[in-house]
């Protein structure tokens, strides 16, 4: 079998009320969380859709692909997630793609500020390293990529502030070399969303049209001790 060059995997939940971005409750309603997740997926996909390779969407729940297919173009391939925990699900997606590709990177949908430059940088790192990892400010990572399966690096505890460090150590223990990409922040909690709002206000030239609209449509009222009371409604366009 002739392997193709490279692929990106967008790893995401289907944006369903009560199932998406649950750590933003009760600051946002279930419907608002789902709308925000949908916006992230659309903006991230728009950023990577012209990537010089193939794009896969690894999703859960497995019977809801039709919802996602309405958000992206027809060039994406879909892989239902499989596994008992986050590590197993990511590992399954990467191993499935590496059966047909020389290299792949997996990215999350919770980092709307990711750029095609971050993807290109990851593949550049993989030219000389076995693994690439791009960290988040909270100690996790939003991108991981490799050229061959390495199951053991996913056998760590997730949902902590040591995920990135633990993964680096697991890579070393596996005898693999690795490089590190740019640090970004992901959107999990209220403080993360407020940080994103600040960024969008200060960087009007950056696209993210779906995310901007989703946030403005929520008409979020900000805490007076965090923002000037005259800015009660979020204006980011």
Image (spheres, grey):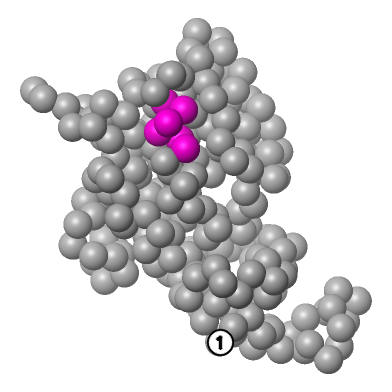
Q: Is residue 103 above or below residue 192?
A: above
Which quadrant, please, contains the C terminus? Answer: bottom right
- Position of residue 211 measured from the top left corner of the image (x, y, whole percent): 52, 73
**Where are the magenta residues, as a range?**
121-126
- Residue at x-position 35% and y-position 44%: 9
Closest to the observer, 185 or 16? 185
- Whether residue 232 is visible, yes or no, is yes
In the rendered view, does 17 fall on the left or right side of 192?
Answer: left
- Residue at x-position 37% and y-position 54%: 48
Q: Residues within 10 Å of mark 1 (few under 14, many from 20)?
A: few
Q: Is residue 123 above or below residue 201?
A: above
List the residue tagged with mark 1: 217
Place residue 168 in its image quadrant.
Answer: top right
Residue farthest front in this picture:
205
Which quadrant, please, contains the N terminus? Answer: top left
Q: Judging from the image, what secondary structure is the residue with disc 1 in?
A: helix
> Main structural element of the magenta stretch: helix, strand or loop?
helix
Q: Is residue 138 above or below residue 98?
A: below
Q: Is residue 89 magenta?
A: no
- Residue at x-position 34% and y-position 23%: 147
- Position of residue 12 measured from the top left corner of the image (x, y, whole percent): 42, 53
Residue farthest bottom in this picture:
230
In the rendered view, does 141 fall on the left or right side of 122?
Answer: right
- Whether residue 67 is visible, yes or no, is no
Residue farthest right in this picture:
225
- Position of residue 208 measured from the top left corner of the image (x, y, whole percent): 50, 70
- Residue at x-position 42% and y-position 31%: 124
- Position of residue 219 measured from the top left corner of the image (x, y, whole percent): 64, 88
């Amino acid at each position: 079998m002739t392997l193709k060059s490279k692929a990106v995997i967008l790893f995401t939940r289907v944006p369903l009320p009560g199932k998406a971005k649950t750590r933003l409750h009760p600051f946002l309603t279930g419907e608002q969380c789902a709308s925000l997740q949908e916006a992230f997926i659309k903006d991230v996909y728009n950023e990577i859709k012209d990537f010089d390779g193939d794009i896969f969407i690894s999703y859960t729940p497995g019977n809801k692909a039709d919802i996602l297919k309405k958000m992206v173009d027809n060039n994406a391939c879909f892989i239902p997630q499989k596994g008992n925990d986050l590590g197993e699900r990511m590992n399954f997606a990467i191993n499935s793609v590496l059966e047909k590709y020389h290299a792949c990177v997996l990215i999350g949908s919770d980092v709307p500020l990711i750029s095609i430059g971050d993807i290109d940088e990851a593949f550049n790192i993989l030219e000389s390293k076995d693994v690439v990892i791009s960290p988040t400010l909270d100690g996790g990572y939003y991108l991981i990529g490799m050229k061959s399966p390495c199951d053991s690096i996913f056998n760590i505890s997730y949902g902590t502030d040591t995920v990135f460090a633990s993964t680096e150590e697991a890579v070393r223990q596996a005898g693999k070399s690795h490089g590190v990409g740019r640090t970004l922040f992901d959107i999990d909690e209220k403080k993360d969303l407020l940080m994103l709002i600040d960024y969008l206000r200060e960087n009007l030239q950056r696209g993210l049209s779906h995310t901007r609209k989703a946030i403005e449509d929520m008409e979020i009222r900000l805490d007076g001790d965090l923002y000037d009371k005259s800015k009660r409604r979020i204006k980011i366009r």
